[in-house]
Image (tube, grey):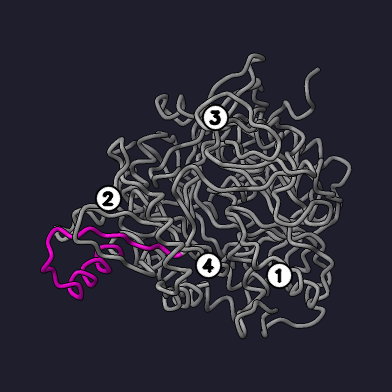
């Protein structure tokens, strides 16, 4: 029996919305856009893009913040049947430009649609890689008032100074929208199960970008599966703070909200420091964020976590569902966050979730109210999961740790153009179902809920950033003073982790003060301050290795635990630095 989500993403959205056209679909500041208006705009944008030459199956690069225009463009591309390749609009560094080129070479888009602020990442490759571009401003939907007109003018002047513009009206979305497309007919694309629909990049465990190929029905399956756990109702307001252009997590929330006829409250203020104020402003009934968002509700006082002094009683009375994801939350903060929510009048209990780009985001959800604390809940209904002994296909027993294997329609088709990496994690079971080896260790507990144990891989989160240990180690090894290095994570409930560098010196008479200045300069030349160490340990002998000649990472993690217990690690300065950015 064919499942009802086996259709194009646009057709699935339309089917879900057809009886709720007068409900609010999007809000942006004071603007409210109904589902009828949403589909009218999607239709116009689809005609525009079709007129510009976009066809079903074309790969289109897309880079935007969470604005109404981004929603219209995304769904217009889905209505045409294009493959959407998301590029992060927040990456504005020299290294990110190189990464953008690599990603462009990987997917070879026919066109790139981008906010003008991010155009500098694309323009130098436009002719060389033979693609066209459409630009638009993230402030396009911000209403014209006395205050915003100054903001918009300043923004335009800034983009002109940076060269983020094209003179031709053929490349300007605002100019293109002024034209009449009533005579343009957009053919309904042919749908087939397993057809490529989206490419979303992931850093993996090493920081090396890989394009994840997702089937057209993958996000539909995620929505259906999430509905089995989260009680979504038409008219509910969901905060739209997670970037949906380039993140599977954000995209799944966008699709989930709109396909359940909720109001998706868009915000340009996506940083953790704005999280509470945006919850208050939008009167959100549901919200998701990483642990770094939710810990903004608490603060440390006299060695305990308590509700933040910035909170107002009754300010979150509308919030009923709160979910953490993207990284494992710390058990030490959960009760304090729940207490902070209650202080603000919310009846929500902080839930959790587990997912990956390779599974179009959600695999499991703990909605906070029906599952036990400190678990990631249960699998969504559209996936099957197993726990295998790592490196085998041998299932572990209940209560034992095992690697999570996810099977179903949400699982990726593979890494784009990278069969070698695909074959390491993807296989098909005896029924022909796609299955993913996740690299996550879990345990099924007595309540038949899953507890997250940790990653087989080595990446971790510090502040707002994924830290890729191996990439950082490779960078540090370029310094002649460093013979070997291992980067380990020091756990902290407020900022997740802080890196600790274990460095074997090339010789014993190195000036440590000078070396640390060089380390800081080197790290900041490629990454930001979250990659800097909270602690450094120096060794005048080679690092400890295992019998297979690999450095014994476990040895240094054990040393970290012992040093921390004995008070030999002080990460307070590094922690405060990260909190100042949140």
**Disc 1 designates what residue?**
337
Residue 182 showing in the rendered view: yes
Tell me the magenta residue range. 498-523
Q: Position of residue 142 (x, y in %)?
A: 62, 67
Question: Which residue is located at x 73 percent, y 26 percent?
Answer: 6
Closest to the camera, between mark 3 and mark 4, is: 4
Residue density around tag 1, few if under 14, some if 14–19, many if 20 or more, within 10 Å:
many
| Left or right, 265 with reference to 197 | right
For the residue labelled by badge 1, is the local secondary structure a helix, a strand or a loop?
A: helix
For the residue labelled by badge 3, is the local secondary structure a helix, a strand or a loop?
A: loop
Q: Which of marks 1 and 4 is nearer the N terminus?
A: 1
Residues under numbered marks 2 and 3 in contact, where contact means CB atoms less than 8 Å apart: no
For the residue labelled by badge 2, is the local secondary structure a helix, a strand or a loop?
A: helix
Q: In this view, does 325 lie above or below 2?
A: below
Q: Which of marks 3 and 1 is nearer the N terminus?
A: 3
Q: Quadrant of the N terminus?
A: top right
Q: In 3D space, how far apart are the residues under numbered discs 1 and 4 (Cα atoms)?
A: 15 Å
Q: Which of marks 1 and 2 is nearer the N terminus?
A: 1
Check if residue 521 falls in the magenta segment. yes
Q: In this view, does 110 lie above or below 255?
A: above
| Left or right, 465 with reference to 522 | right
Residue density around tag 4, few if under 14, some if 14–19, many if 20 or more, within 10 Å:
some
**Disc 3 designates what residue?**
55
Residue 34 showing in the rendered view: no
**Disc 2 designates what residue?**
474
**Disc 4 designates what residue?**
492
């Amino acid at each position: 029996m064919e499942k009802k989500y086996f259709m194009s993403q646009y057709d699935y959205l339309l089917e879900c919305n057809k009886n709720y056209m007068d409900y609010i679909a999007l809000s942006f500041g004071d603007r409210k856009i109904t589902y009828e208006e949403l589909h009218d705009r999607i239709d116009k944008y689809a005609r525009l893009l079709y007129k510009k030459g976009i066809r079903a199956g074309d790969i289109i690069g897309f880079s935007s913040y969470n604005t109404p225009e981004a929603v219209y463009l995304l769904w217009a591309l889905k209505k045409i049947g294009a493959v959407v390749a998301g590029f992060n609009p927040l990456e504005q560094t020299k290294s990110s430009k190189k990464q953008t080129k690599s990603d462009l070479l990987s997917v070879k888009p026919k066109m790139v649609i981008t906010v003008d602020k991010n155009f500098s990442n694309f323009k130098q490759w436009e002719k060389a890689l033979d693609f066209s571009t459409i630009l638009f401003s993230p402030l396009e939907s911000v209403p014209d008032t006395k205050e915003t007109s100054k903001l918009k003018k300043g923004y335009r002047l800034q983009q002109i100074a940076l060269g983020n513009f094209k003179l031709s009206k053929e490349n300007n979305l605002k100019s293109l929208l002024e034209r009449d497309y009533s005579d343009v007919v957009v053919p309904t694309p042919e749908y087939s199960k397993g057809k490529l629909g989206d490419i979303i990049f992931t850093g993996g465990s090493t920081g090396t970008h890989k394009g994840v190929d997702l089937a057209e029905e993958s996000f539909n399956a995620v929505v259906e599966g999430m509905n089995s756990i989260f009680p979504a109702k038409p008219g509910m307001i969901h905060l739209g703070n997670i970037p949906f252009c380039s993140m599977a997590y954000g995209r799944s929330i966008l699709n989930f909200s709109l396909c359940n006829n909720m109001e998706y409250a868009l915000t340009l203020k996506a940083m953790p420091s704005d999280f509470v104020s945006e919850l208050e402003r939008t009167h959100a009934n549901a919200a998701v964020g990483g642990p770094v968002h939710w810990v903004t509700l608490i603060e440390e006082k006299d060695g305990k976590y308590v509700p933040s002094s910035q909170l107002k009683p009754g300010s979150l009375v509308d919030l009923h569902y709160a979910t953490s994801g993207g990284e494992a939350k710390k058990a030490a903060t959960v009760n304090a966050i729940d207490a902070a929510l209650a202080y603000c009048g919310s009846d929500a209990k902080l839930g959790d979730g587990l997912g990956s780009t390779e599974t179009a985001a959600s695999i499991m959800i703990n909605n906070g109210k029906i599952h036990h604390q400190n678990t990631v809940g249960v699998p969504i209904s559209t996936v099957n999961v197993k726990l295998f002994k790592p490196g085998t296909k041998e299932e572990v027993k209940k209560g034992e740790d095992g690697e999570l294997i996810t099977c179903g329609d949400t699982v990726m088709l593979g890494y784009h153009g990278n069969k070698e990496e695909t074959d390491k994690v993807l296989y098909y079971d005896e029924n022909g179902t796609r299955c993913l080896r996740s690299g996550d260790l879990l345990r099924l507990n007595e309540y038949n809920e899953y507890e997250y144990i940790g990653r087989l891989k080595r990446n971790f989160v510090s502040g707002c950033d994924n830290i890729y240990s191996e990439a950082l180690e490779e960078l540090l090894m370029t310094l002649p003073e460093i013979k070997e290095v291992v980067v380990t994570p020091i756990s902290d409930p407020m900022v997740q982790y802080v890196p600790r560098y274990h460095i074997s010196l090339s010789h014993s008479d190195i000036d440590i003060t000078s070396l640390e200045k060089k380390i800081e300069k080197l790290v900041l030349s490629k990454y930001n301050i979250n990659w800097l160490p909270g602690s450094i340990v120096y060794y005048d002998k080679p690092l400890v290795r295992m019998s297979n000649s690999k450095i014994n990472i476990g040895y240094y993690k054990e040393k970290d635990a012992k040093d921390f217990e004995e008070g030999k690690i002080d990460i307070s300065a590094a922690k405060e630095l990260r909190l100042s950015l949140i």
